[in-house]
Image: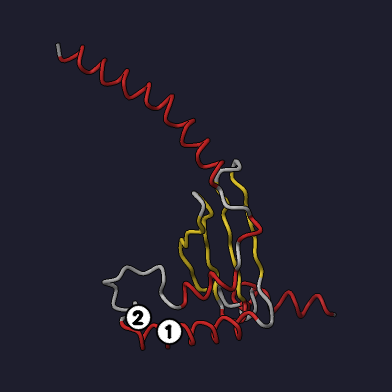
Amino acid sequence: LSSFLASMLFGTMFMLYLIGLPALYFYAVQTCPPAMTFNAKKELKRVLRGHHLPDTHPDKPQGMWEEWTARITATLTTELATFPGYEVQQHNLFDAVIGVKVTVPTANLEAYWIGAFSKWHYVYSRELEPRNAAAGVGTGTAGARASTSRR
């Protein structure tokens, strides 16, 4: 009897998988936001003002005054950081999801979003490696190679 129930459960789950996965993919394709709707400055401002944080998070602005100052600070920071330039890379995944990476060198920041189900969802951000460390400047072998190549 238990093997019969297990086979029924497996059969039901398999049918849901066969029907549900294509239905979910079709829904994701239909609701994927167009790539041109991603506005890097707007999304950076939202992240900097703490829009993605839960209401109970200590860094989330509470009250009208804190929200107002967070908006002004986020706007100034975004405009100053992106003024020299920033890079946006978009990757389309099977026409159902768009992955976006925004690199802001002056702010030493790399941020990631996913466009799915009619919205842009913030994923995470990280600090960039310093340019000197990434290029090998300051290490003994890189300096030796640079000096011998100039001769």
Measured from the top left, where is residue 61 in percent x and y?
35, 80
Q: Secondary structure beneath disc 2?
A: loop
Residue visible at 50% across and 82% down? 74
- Residue at left offset 48%, top offset 68%: 125
The residue labelled by disc 2 is: 61
Whether residue 62 sits left or right of residue 27 in the image: it is left
The residues bearing labels 2 and 1 have C-alpha atoms spaced at a distance of 7 Å
Residue 60 location (% of width, % of height): 34, 77
Q: Is residue 43 left or right of residue 82?
A: left
Q: CB of mark 2 within 8 Å of CB of mark 1?
A: yes
Q: Nearer the viewer, residue 133 or 44?
A: 44
Q: Position of residue 33 (x, y in %)?
A: 57, 52
- From this viewpoint, which residue is outermost toward the right? 151
Please state if 5 lies on the left or on the right of 30 as rendered: left
**In the rendered image, which residue does mark 1 sit on?**
70
Q: Quadrant of residue 75?
A: bottom right
Residue at image location 60% in from the left, 69% down from the top: 40
- Other residues around mark 1 within 10 Å, as few (<14) / some (14–19) / many (≥20): many
SS at badge 1: helix
Mark 2, other Cα within 10 Å: few <14 / some 14–19 / many ≥20: many
Q: Residue furthest front?
A: 64
